[in-house]
Image: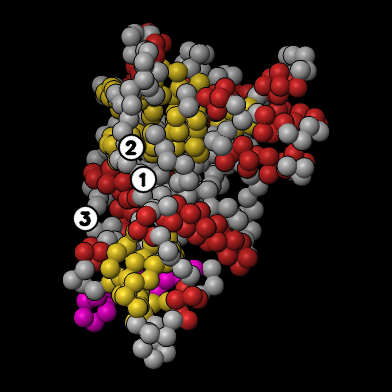
Amino acid sequence: MEDIYRDRSRIIEFFNSHGLLIASDALDLLLKSNSGDLVNRLITRETLDSGYISVDKIRQTLNIPYDSSDRKFEIYLPDVRVKSSVDDFRGYFVSRYEKLRKIISLSSAMRGSTDIKGIKKIREDVREVKLVAMVSEVSVTRNGHRRLLVEDLDDSIEVMIMKNKKSFNEIILEDEVIGIVGGLSAKGDRKTIFANEIIRPDIPYRVIDDEKGDPVYVASLSDIHVGSKTFRKNDFIQMINWIKRSDSDSSRIKYLVLSGDVVDGIGVYPGQDSDLEILEPLEQYRKLSEYVNQVPEDIKVFIMPGNHDIVRLAEPQPVLPERLKKDFNDNIYFLPNPYNLVLEGKNVLIYHGMSLNDMVELIPGLNFSTVGKAIEELLRRRHLAPKYGGKTPLIPSPNDYHVIETVPDIFITGHVHSHTIGNYKGVRYVNSSTWQSQTDYQKMMNFSPNPSMFTLFDLKSKSTIIKDFKS
Ligand SMILES: [Fe+2]
């Protein structure tokens, strides 16, 4: 612990690993405090429930009198370098492998697993070997069997999945981490594993318990696209007015999540200018603030960026720039993409959803109207972007932030402009609709969005409410 509290990025990472955000002024004070065990003392029921650490919380913990000056709230993402080297790629994949290996190894089917080096030392055919590996190549043989090349930290080996096996139906993507149980063929120099079973990290099945008391809602909406000519202003104003009216449902909203593409941006696709009503991005955010500032101040609003927003495209995306904060009320917080919030002790995983495009393309039978299935495929793989590359630009940081380390209670996504809710083994999920009408591009792609839908999840029970604000 001695050196953790001297290092900004390690402190941020430490709190992030507990699903906590830390305010910039809180971080400054913490670094100044020189109190070695303070970081651990800040992991309390109260901070975990609120999801963040404020400067007031630190003052309270250290018995420093309250000071109302200089209150700001900025969320930090651990340092992520944009320039990447071969080492960064290795570090990134090692992080991905290690995190998922830990999860897969929890499966009882993986008891007694070993590494590839160990398997390669075996000189005779063996009925059963078990290993956790990352898939580096997937191909189909001339006879229609599936051939994988898989690797762990030190070595690689060939795996065959014969077409008569049940696991042949598993769709396996490059770069994903899987458990393999199979027989080893060790004849000659060539060692091959014939897979009997593919083990996914997956979600352990849970039942959602209803807690006592009134509902506490986290509401979700996405892809507002303020600034676009096709932004459905009237629907959006209706929705804000409904929240303000405070009926029995809206009065119980405590959190509101906007999961990316809050504005339309500029230069996102060729010829976008002719689709824009507001051509200046900062003006688009200012307009957004006019709407969102009307949300009652006792509701915490979280804004995440998406691929139309002003930050870099590659994920993990940092929070929106600090200079935009001045237009937004104090109850409005900026989040990085992706992010795991802890609200009322529940894990709420939020991801804009760029990789859903890749999943729909890579998994046979999926399309944008079955995006719920794509969401479930992410959960089964415990990874938000299983295939590296594709249409989802990722930064190869030494920490793979896309691994779903903590099982979410609620998983919120956006990006594809459909509206789908579902429940996968006790994880409630949503693709949070949009507030934009069908664009010419979507018309060309033959895709009809389902706009102006508003989803409320009760954090205390399994009840979910959908409100339709389409006019
Ligand atoms: Fe969008």
Depth check, front residue: 343 or 85:
343
Viewer-nearest of discs 3 and 2: 2
Q: Position of residue 296 (x, y in %)?
A: 48, 13
Residue drawn at point x = 44 percent, y = 33 percent: 348
Q: Tell me which amino acid carries mark 2.
A: Arg
Side of 25 relative to 76 (left or right): right
Q: Which mark is residue 365?
A: 3
Q: Earlier in the sequence, mark 3 or mark 1?
A: 1
Q: How many marks?
A: 3
Residue 454 can be seen, yes or no: no
Q: CA distance from mark 1 to mark 2?
A: 9 Å
In which quadrant of the rendered image does the C terminus lie? top left
Q: Tell me which amino acid carries mark 3.
A: Gly
Q: Position of residue 379 (x, y in %)?
A: 36, 47
Q: Position of residue 259 (x, y in %)?
A: 44, 34
Residue drawn at point x = 39 percent, y = 37 percent: 411
Judging from the image, what secondary structure is the residue with disc 2 in? loop
| Residue that badge 1 annotates | 203
Judging from the image, what secondary structure is the residue with disc 3 in? loop
Stretch in magenta: 137-152
